[in-house]
Image: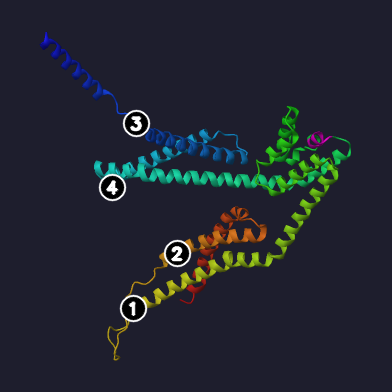
Amino acid sequence: MKIMRIFRRKKREDELKELIKEKPAKKSFKDLFKKKGDIKKKEHIIKRRKHKLGFYLTKAGLVIEPRKASRVLFNSCVVLNFIISIFLIFYFSIRLGYSLLYLTIIMAILWFFAFIILLFAMWSLFYIFLDLKIFKRRIDLEGVLPDFLQLTSANIKAGMSTDKALWYAVRPRFGVLAKEIEAVAKETMGGKDLREALLDFTKKYDSLVLKRSISLIIEGINAGGEIGDLLNKVALNIQESAVMKKEMAANVTTYVIFITFATVVAAPFLFALSSQLIAIVQSLTSRIAVPATTGMSFALSFTGTGIKATDFKIFAVISLIITSFFSSLIVATIKKGDIKEGIRYIPLFMASTVVLFFLANILLNRLLGIFF
């Protein structure tokens, strides 16, 4: 009996040991708290990125979900990288005849490094597109805002309430502003306060003029003053500011003409002249036959490689493109007061400088070819 009890006790102890081994180790409160904190931090970063993208999309006037936009960009990047991969496989395998191992290494590098760079570039271009879209919407809205405020002022003076005056001042020629005011009117009809609807409207645009105008309207509503006269004065103030900007742009026209002439006309002509001088010097030195040694204590030699005319042309084109890019931005800043206005000047400046460089090169080649 004693032997049986000892055997059973030992069996129970072995079972308990196995249970203890199988039981997972308990995590400390600190580890659990740290893990939860990391998860919350990651979720907060993802939400913040989505909120920022959604904020940009709203300001740009694009009705697209942030998740959908991210998916489209990612899929586009995958497709583009796949097309590049097919081209590289065809080029390296058929044209150059590289081995499978070499192709595998190239594809691994392409899908690791090039994919990340391509994705970053596509996101950068997408945000630049959104930024330009936001800027264009702001310019369009500020251009028609004074006329809209004057019509609203006339409606208020005719006896309408503020929300009705805003609604009846909408005209098709106001474009994006007309759509926004219609949205504000629908929200107020649905029971939303007019002041809240107007504040939500200002959040969609990066316009100080719009925010100041709407804040004055809200302060006038709260104070119970003459909204019609206030709106008329605000509209006149905006128009006066626009006239002052045009006068300032007219005063600095001389600087704009100088920069444009130096970039578009002078720089291509001087680069073309330098290119022709290099070609002339190379042709002259190739004709001169100088003995290896002379009666002097030194020797002359024209056998050096020097600068090639083709290399100089490549350098000239790159220099002209960079110069025209920054010149267009400087012209926009001087003339319009905003560097974003220079985006439309960039292709015009670049094309003009490069075309004039090649035309000047051909013209100087024919003129100087008569003498050399």
Residue 175 visible in this rendered orientation of the protein:
no
Confirm or deny contact between disc 4 and disc 3 (CB under 8 A).
no
Please tell me which of labels 1 and 3 falls first in the chain.
3
Q: Which residue lies furthest to the top in this view?
A: 1
Please give the label number shown on residue 302: 1
Please tell me which of labels 4 and 1 falls first in the chain.
4
Say which residue label 2 marks: 315
Q: Main secondary structure of the magenta part?
A: helix
Who's the residue at 85% across and 42% down the image? 225
Question: What is the secondary structure assignment of the residue under circle 4?
Answer: loop
Name the quadrant containing residue 99: top left
Identified by mark 2, the residue type is Phe
Confirm or deny contact between disc 1 and disc 2 (CB under 8 A).
no
Was residue 164 drawn as part of the magenta stretch in this picture?
Answer: yes
Mark 1–mark 2 distance (CA, rounded to whole Å): 24 Å
Question: What is the secondary structure assignment of the residue under circle 2?
Answer: helix
Q: In this view, does 194 lie to the left or right of 44?
A: right
Mark 1–mark 3 distance (CA, rounded to whole Å): 81 Å
Circle 3 or circle 2, nearest the eye = 3
Q: Is residue 37 left or right of residue 220?
A: left
Who's the residue at 34% across and 78% down the image? 302
Where 117 sits versus 15, above or below?
below
Q: Which x, y percent locates residue 360?
A: 53, 66
Who's the residue at 84% across and 40% down the image? 224
- Which portion, as a residue range, is magenta? 161-166
Packing grade of label 3 (10 A; few <14, some 14-19, many >=20) is: few
Residue situated in front as seen by the camera: 237 or 252 = 237
Say which residue label 4 marks: 96
Q: Which x, y percent locates residue 40?
A: 46, 35
Mark 3–mark 2 distance (CA, rounded to whole Å): 65 Å
Quadrant placement of the C terminus: bottom left
